[in-house]
Image (cartoon, rainbow, N blue to C red):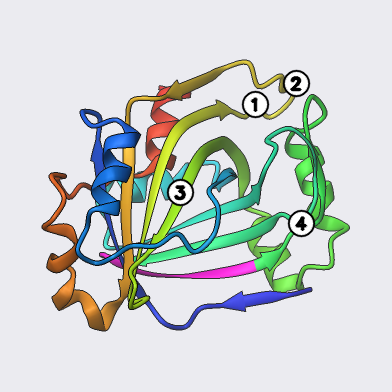
């Protein structure tokens, strides 16, 4: 089983706008003096978020806990059907800085047969380390999330920027999922700036150019509150 643990913490700053459309946001990025370039083509990102039965991760986020984490399974391309090469990701945050742990997750099928029992079976027969399986025993799939991401990086490669749009969310029942209970948000555009924490004193040179307000935005929280509450 392959695993990646990112020991270096990086900063992440999020900005959300529902006033400017994606084309205007892209135009602002292209006009930025940081000379942003596109390192690779845009793509759809899909996630299954995991949480405890008491929704600890969700409550840590909305309470503003300084130390918090998210657990999700991520893949690219089609949302439903046979999923090859998914990645289990633990996102660990401390204020504005964070790091990630990545693990290969076994292929699975997202469709009518996907439920908690199916998810647990996939974990049990996987090649993941016992320590990871042990941690996952207390987590259940609670939300499916999908969005379209465009990638940018400054010419000096010190700052990365992403633009997320076309967000959609689906709830996950313990059994009998048809994924018809969903919510789509085509108004919000989420801009995120990512950089090494030793560059934090320079972030104003990037962010101050944009007419956005820094916000505490969480797709996971928005999704839970859109399809459950």
* Residue indicated by mark 3: 150
* Residue indicated by mark 1: 173
* Residue indicated by mark 4: 85
Q: Residue at x 37, y 69 (%)?
A: 98
Q: Position of residue 153 (x, y in %)?
A: 38, 65
Disc 2, SS: loop
Q: Position of residue 214 (x, y in %)?
A: 17, 50
The part of the chain drawn in magenta is: 94-102
- The prevailing secondary structure element of the residues shown in magenta is strand
71 is higher (above) or lower (below) than 172: below
Residues under numbered marks 3 and 2 in contact, where contact means CB atoms less than 8 Å apart: no
Residues under numbered marks 2 and 1 in contact, where contact means CB atoms less than 8 Å apart: yes
Quadrant assignment for the N terminus: bottom right
Q: Is residue 110 visible in this depiction of the protein? A: yes
Instruction: Say whether residue 10 is left or right of residue 102.
Output: left
- CA distance separating discs 3 and 1: 31 Å
Q: Which mark is residue 176?
A: 2
Residues under numbered marks 1 and 4 in contact, where contact means CB atoms less than 8 Å apart: no
Disc 4, SS: loop
């Amino acid at each position: 089983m392959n695993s990646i643990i990112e020991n270096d913490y990086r900063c992440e700053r999020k900005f959300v706008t529902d006033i400017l459309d994606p084309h205007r946001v892209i135009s602002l990025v292209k006009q930025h003096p940081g000379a942003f370039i596109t390192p690779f083509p845009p793509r759809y990102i899909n996630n299954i978020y995991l949480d405890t039965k008491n929704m600890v991760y969700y409550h840590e986020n909305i309470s503003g806990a300084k130390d918090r984490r998210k657990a999700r399974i991520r893949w690219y391309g089609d949302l439903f059907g046979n999923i090859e090469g998914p990645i289990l990701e633990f996102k660990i945050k401390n204020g504005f800085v964070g790091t990630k742990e990545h693990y290969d997750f076994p292929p699975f099928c997202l469709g009518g047969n996907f439920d908690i029992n199916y998810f647990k079976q996939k974990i049990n027969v996987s090649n993941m380390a016992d320590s990871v399986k042990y941690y996952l025993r207390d987590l259940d799939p609670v939300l499916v999330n999908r969005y379209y991401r465009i990638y940018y990086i400054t010419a000096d490669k010190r700052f990365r920027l992403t633009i997320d749009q076309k967000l959609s969310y689906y709830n996950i029942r313990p059994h009998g999922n048809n994924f018809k209970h969903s919510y789509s948000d085509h108004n919000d555009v989420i801009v995120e700036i990512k950089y090494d924490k030793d560059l934090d004193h320079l972030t104003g040179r990037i962010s101050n150019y944009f007419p956005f307000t820094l916000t505490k935005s969480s797709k996971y929280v928005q999704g839970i509150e859109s399809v459950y509450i």
